[in-house]
């Protein structure tokens, strides 16, 4: 499999920033949340090398794997990082990448209407049909699933007490 042009999350720099930087995820989130985030990105390297090729199909990333399940689903292609993924944009904002690390209530939630990285840990082509970068009305987003009936599921539920800083 040919290596893709993917820019990995800078896990080495985040570790370095644990005590030195005000932008450290270790200062923003609990140790467990931050460790999970770092582990996710470290495992992504192995996924890209061993599994990603099994999840590709003819026409990827330029063409979506299927028809959109919802009217607000758009196929987003990042030409620079060479990946494509569905985006469900419930905000009024244009789909653009926020290059700043504006985290939300979890390190897996970012203020960006476009996904900052390829979704990893996909195990099959079929998963690409329902996996999406789901953007809430306020522009915060995360990877989640669009069920076949159009219902959205996200892993990092927003807590009522969370407020944007």
Image: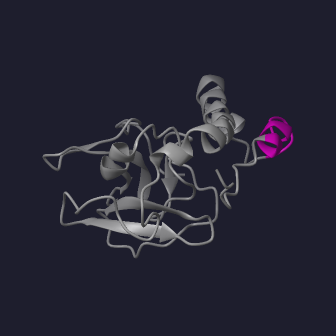
Membership of 20 in magenta stretch: yes
Bounds of the magenta span?
12-21
Q: Position of residue 57 (x, y in %)?
A: 42, 56
Where is 67 relative to 31, above or below?
below
Which one is nearer the viewer's eye here, 18 or 66? 66
Picture quadrant of residue 79: bottom right
9 displayed left or right of 147: right
Is residue 50 part of the magenta span, yes or no?
no
State the residue at coordinates (40%, 76%).
Answer: 94
Left or right, residue 120 beside residue 145: right
Where residue 128 sits: x, y (%)? 37, 50
Q: Which of the 4 quarters of the picture holds residue 17?
A: top right
Q: Is residue 157 visible?
A: yes
Q: Nearer the viewer, residue 27 or 77?
A: 77
Q: Residue furthest bottom?
A: 94
x and y percentages locating residue 56 in the rendered image: 47, 53
For residue 47, above or below residue 99 = above
Pick whichever, 63 or 17, lies toward us.
Answer: 63
Vertical position of residue 62 compared to residue 55: above or below: below
| Between 131 and 97, the one nearer to me in the picture | 131
Which residue is at the far left?
A: 149
Q: Position of residue 137 (x, y in %)?
A: 32, 60
């Amino acid at each position: 499999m040919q290596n893709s042009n993917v820019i990995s999350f800078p896990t080495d720099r985040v570790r370095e920033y644990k005590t030195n930087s005000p932008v450290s995820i270790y200062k923003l989130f609990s140790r467990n949340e931050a460790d999970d985030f770092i582990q996710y990105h470290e495992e992504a390297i192995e996924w890209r090398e061993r599994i990603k090729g099994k999840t590709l199909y003819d026409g990827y990333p330029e063409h979506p794997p299927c028809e959109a399940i919802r009217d607000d689903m758009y196929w987003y292609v990042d030409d620079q990082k060479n990946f494509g993924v569905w985006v469900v944009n419930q905000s009024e904002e244009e789909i653009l990448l926020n290059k700043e690390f504006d985290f939300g209530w979890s390190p897996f939630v970012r203020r960006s209407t476009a996904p900052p990285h390829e979704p990893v840990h996909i195990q099959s082509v079929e998963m690409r049909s329902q996996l999406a970068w789901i953007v809430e009305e306020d522009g915060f987003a995360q990877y989640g699933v669009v069920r076949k009936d159009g219902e959205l599921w996200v892993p990092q539920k927003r807590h009522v007490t969370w407020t944007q800083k």
